[in-house]
């Protein structure tokens, strides 16, 4: 079985890591899960000194399902209004990978 994995990356200050995690859980996760074709949502986090890296890793049944979430430009990162309170920059692109579940 093959699925499409979408990976977004962002960085916050380490002091805001817990607050941003909660924000993503309350805003982004329900948004992802509301779209038919979303299979799963994971949030990865790694603190390196004063910086905290976040990755949202979502699995989808098709590119068409991702388009329902992301819009016409699948590679464009999707942001929420309150992201500006936390993120150190706004990366423009996400990546998509074929994922083989064995």
Image (spheres, rainbow, N blue to C red):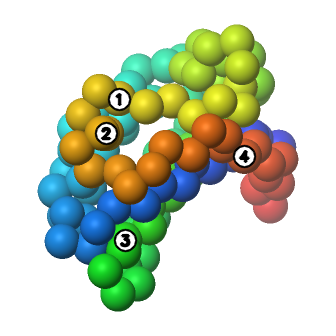
Look at mark 1 in the image and give the residue it sits on: 80
Q: Residue 95 has which mark?
A: 4
Instruction: Tell me which label, 4 or 3, sits earlier in the chain.
Output: 3
Instruction: Tell me which label, 1 or 4, sits earlier in the chain.
Output: 1
Badge 1, how many Cα within 10 Å: few under 14, some, many 20+? few
Q: Identify the residue at horizontal 41%, vertical 21% (top origin).
A: 34
Badge 4, how many Cα within 10 Å: few under 14, some, many 20+? some
Residue 60 appears left or right of 35: right
Is label 2 in contact with label 1 (beta carbons under 8 Å)?
Answer: yes
Provide residue 96's location: percent of width, then percent of height.
75, 43
Residue 98 appears left or right of 29: right
The CA distance from mark 4 to mark 3 is: 20 Å
Asked which quadrant contains residue 17, the reply is bottom left
Provide residue 46's location: percent of width, then percent of height.
42, 76
Q: Identify the residue at horizontal 37%, vertical 71% (top origin).
A: 52
Provide residue 15's location: percent of width, then percent of height.
18, 71
> Which secondary structure, mark 1?
loop
| Farthest residue, direction bottom | 49
Is label 1 in contact with label 3 (beta carbons under 8 Å)?
Answer: no
Q: Identify the residue at horizontal 79%, vertical 48% (top origin).
A: 97
Look at mark 3 in the image and give the residue it sits on: 52
């Amino acid at each position: 079985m093959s699925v499409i994995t979408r990976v977004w990356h962002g960085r916050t200050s380490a002091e805001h890591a817990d607050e941003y995690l909660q924000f993503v859980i309350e805003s982004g996760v329900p948004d992802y899960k509301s779209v038919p074709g979303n299979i799963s949502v994971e949030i990865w986090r790694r603190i390196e000194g004063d910086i905290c890296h976040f990755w949202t890793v979502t699995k989808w049944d098709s590119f068409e399902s991702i388009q329902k979430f992301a819009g016409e430009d699948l590679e464009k990162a999707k942001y929420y209004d309150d992201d500006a309170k936390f993120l150190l920059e706004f990366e423009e692109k996400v990546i998509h990978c074929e994922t083989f579940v064995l």
